[in-house]
Image: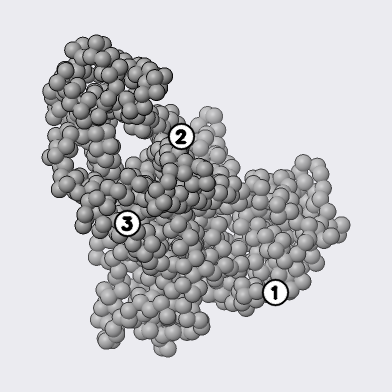
Amino acid sequence: MEHIVIIGNGISGVTLARHVRKLSDKKITIVSAETDYFFSRTALMYVYMGHMKFKHTQPYENWFWKKNRIELKKGYVKQIETEDKMLHFAEGDTLQYDKLIIATGSKPNKFGWPGQDLNGVMGMYHKQDLESLETYAPNNEVCKRAVIVGGGLIGIELAEMLNSRKIPVTFLVREDSFWNGVLPKGESEMINEHIKNHHIDLRLATNLKAINSDEHGNVKSVIIEETGEELECNVVGLTAGVAPNVDFLRDSGIEIGRGVKVNRFLETNIPDVYAIGDCAEQHEAIGNRRPIEAVWYTGRMMGETLAQTICDNKTEYKPGHWFNSAKFLDIEYQTYGWVFAERGRPEYEQHFHWRHAKENICITVAFHKDSNEFLGINTFGIRMRHEIFDKWLTEKRDVDYVMSHLKDANFDPEFFKTYENDILTQYNNTFNTNLTAHKKSWKRIFSKV
Amino acid sequence: MKAIKTIGLVIFLIGLAIFTALPLLGTYNLNEADFNTIVKEQNIKSDVFINELKSNIIGTDFNGMQTLSPKISEALNNANESHIKNKEWDKKIYTSSSDMAAVIGKKSANGFIANNKGFMWFLTFGLGIIGALMFILPNVILLGKKGIKNDGVYHESATNRGWIGWMVFIFLVSFYLVLYFASEYATNWTLIVDPISESLSGNPAGHWFVYGFMYCTVMTVMAVRMYIKYRHNIYQVFRTTSVLFFQIVFAFLIPEIMVRLQMPYYDFKNAFPLDYDFFFQWNLKDLINNGGIGIFILVWGIVLTLIVVPVMVYFFGKRWYCSWVCGCGGLAETLGDPYRQHSDKSLFAWKVERYLIHAVLLFVLIMTGMTLYSFFTETGTVLGIKTATVQSIYSLVIGSIFAGVIGTGFYPIFGNRVWCRFGCPLAAYLGFVQRFKSRFRITTNGGQCISCGNCSTYCEQGIDVRAYAQKGENIIRSSCVGCGICSAVCPRGVLKLENGPEKGRINPTEILLGNDVDLMDLVNQK
């Protein structure tokens, strides 16, 4: 029986294993050094905040793996011999494979800051980071202040976590507005305000210079690059992005760039070795996507796709329309299609932005300024229907159609106040159009492309 | 703000302590005239009982029900023993000793509590309400910006099965045990709500009036908590208002007022088979003897169960009843909201649930079949089994112990929907309709799920919502009561409760939206 070995028990590896099991009878082993069972990394924050226990982050009960004949092996892969198809573990044992899938995810970036390995300096990615945070920041007496370095999605989550235990947070963001490499100006500014409203000390355009130690090797303070200011703190969160977790592969002969280099079939340069998820790097970016996509959804999609290839239905990784979501403290964010920030925006991309006068609700619609083709939408504080936008993108609807049919796309809970009419009024005023809003239609919602 | 909360908590606990002590306090002294009235009203023919009470109880001061109740119980047992021995069946007393003690206690209470009902009401209910509100209202400010506020749920003793949770458990279970099995100890509670009962129905309060009044009070206070916690979520605000309205108006006020108008006591929203004694002989006779209104209630009760309930479930899902109208659901969604995370999400629990709830449904249907057969043929037995025995087993085991003691008492341990999930026969019936013929579903938003598990954790019915959402599949489960909390706590806007076309409602998927369309077609349409 062919033995499929997957290194990494995150969403990519587990999705792959589940699908291979559905399609075949192959022997499957998932290797992880992090945890015994698959858990949802995105939910670690809720454990610290007391919304859930760690066991709630595990999507499958413990009997699931045995029942589906997916073997779980706890161990740290030290070396891979691709000639003999053999894994060597740090613990000394070995494992033979027929096909190997590298799904080792990411690790937090560290940029060589002085003091970056002190006690109390941590990322927020692994389960061990959560345990470390619980040790160094159990409450606001042990941790009098925390400094977070790096203004991305994990940074704001860590800020929210610490805030939930009333630990004062200083949030150092390199950019001059939060996440403005991704979010257009209006949205980024709304999030800036929202962060400050939660009494988080947001410092924009501010970099870390060094982390200082006390006599026990614990964090004592940080020094700000721009001002030289010293901020006393007990915990430093490094959340300046993540990088593929591939250091253990350097001598294996598997081609490594920033991540494991793969082609569109997710194959590496070595036969029978594949890579999926955060650690995979496409030779060439697919569409507007980045060569390395460290996103939950893309990891899952690669797992779904590669399972076909492994089970003798060779399938190219062809992700559909881009989508993503996040939550910034109390504000939910969804995006469908492409909406670019000021930086890197194609010259043909035009935006329409609407923001509620008082609430933290806004949308940005991107469209082609010549053809009027709808390109994408960012929504904050309004939930939208994935199916609808996916369909509109496939159908290449123009922006007028999208704006007048927004009610079909609304996904907020029942009885919520709706804003489609306000949005359309502003759209009409801006572009001198005279569109009228169409009532929500189940027929349109369920119609196929 | 913190200080107000602390003072509120202290005031609440004082009120609660006095309330809890009341069953053992108070003085009782039965006079001859009152006793004669009781003998007449209760139609007591046992001279043994009457004489024993006259010599041992009448004219004597008793401090606390715990001194009076055993005496009455003893007298009653002695009397029945001697009547059984002498085969004097007409003299035997069928009233339980507990009920007898309650009747006598109510008439004979004469101390401070009986003479200061309003003041005692203030010291118990009054302090409880004021204290609880002082504890709850500062949350408007303390909870900060509107949004999901579950910080610390698993750090707090009260909501994480810590010692406070267990204390609440002991209190609730004891309360229900008194209510169902030792109602004489509720005498002082009935006294303090007498003025309210008299103003509504014209009658003094019994222990079920205490329960009804307390139910409404607790729901109202905890609804304030819901309004604050979910103030960003209008669905929750509407739903809370709805359950509160139906509890106060339909379950509490209308039946009391109907009694004042010489009509039968009836809760128009309480549908069979949750209302399991609707077809009991005494109820049918009572309704038939009550003329127009009685017949109307009889017809309404049948129409409600056979037509209104399933038709509404077809259009809106069973939520219209279970989390918008029902009293049990109303308490679960207000008092029980802090405990919703304790429902067991395991596959094993789901199996237990299906066996238990359908067994109860079968039980109630068989019992009702026997009841109706007995009613129309005027026999007491069916196939040699006494109908009355089956009825009393159901009333005791399901009606009292399961629905009351376990259903509510176990809130802090097993979550707030134990009865609704594992026991309620009406929920089982609605569940069939919801699963097989309904427009209701919880739509999963394409591929947006990140498997975080908030939805499953906070599902009071123990549904593993995430198991569906992470497959991009709509949630169609017979047990879903449509409380809407999964949708509220989802950080990525994945879940929406909605009523739509039946076609495409059940949509199992393997490859989620967002991936290669050809792959989706290949795998999903197998």
Q: Chain of mark 2?
A: B
Label 1, on which residue?
Answer: A315
Residue B74 is labelled as: none
Which residue is at a point 35% across and 54% down the rendered structure image?
B271
Residue A310 lies in quadrant = bottom right
Characterize the local packing of mark 3: few (<14), some (14-19) or many (20 or more) Cα atoms within 10 angstroms. many
Instruction: Please tell me whether mark 2 sits on a helix, a strand or a loop.
Output: loop
Amino acid type, callout 2:
Arg
Q: Chain of mark 3?
A: B
From the viewer's side, name the closer residue of B310 and B19: B310
From the viewer's side, name the closer residue of B474 and A8: B474
Characterize the local packing of mark 1: few (<14), some (14-19) or many (20 or more) Cα atoms within 10 angstroms. many
Q: Can you say whether B233 is above or below A341 in the image?
A: above
Instruction: Give the Cα separation between the discs numbered 3 and 1.
Output: 60 Å
Which residue is at a point 30% across and 80% down the rendered structure image?
A437
Instruction: Give the Cα separation between the discs numbered 1 and 2.
Output: 50 Å
- Marks 1 and 2: same chain? no
Label 2, on which residue?
Answer: B161
Amino acid type, callout 3:
Gly
Instruction: Please tell me whether mark 1 sits on a helix, a strand or a loop.
Output: loop
- Whether residue B171 is visible, yes or no, is no
Q: In the rendered view, does A345 fall on the left or right side of B299? A: right
Label 3, on which residue?
Answer: B301
Q: Position of residue B156 (x, y in %)?
A: 41, 35
Instruction: Give the Cα separation between the discs numbered 3 and 2.
Output: 40 Å
Q: In the rendered view, does B237 fall on the left or right side of A224? A: left
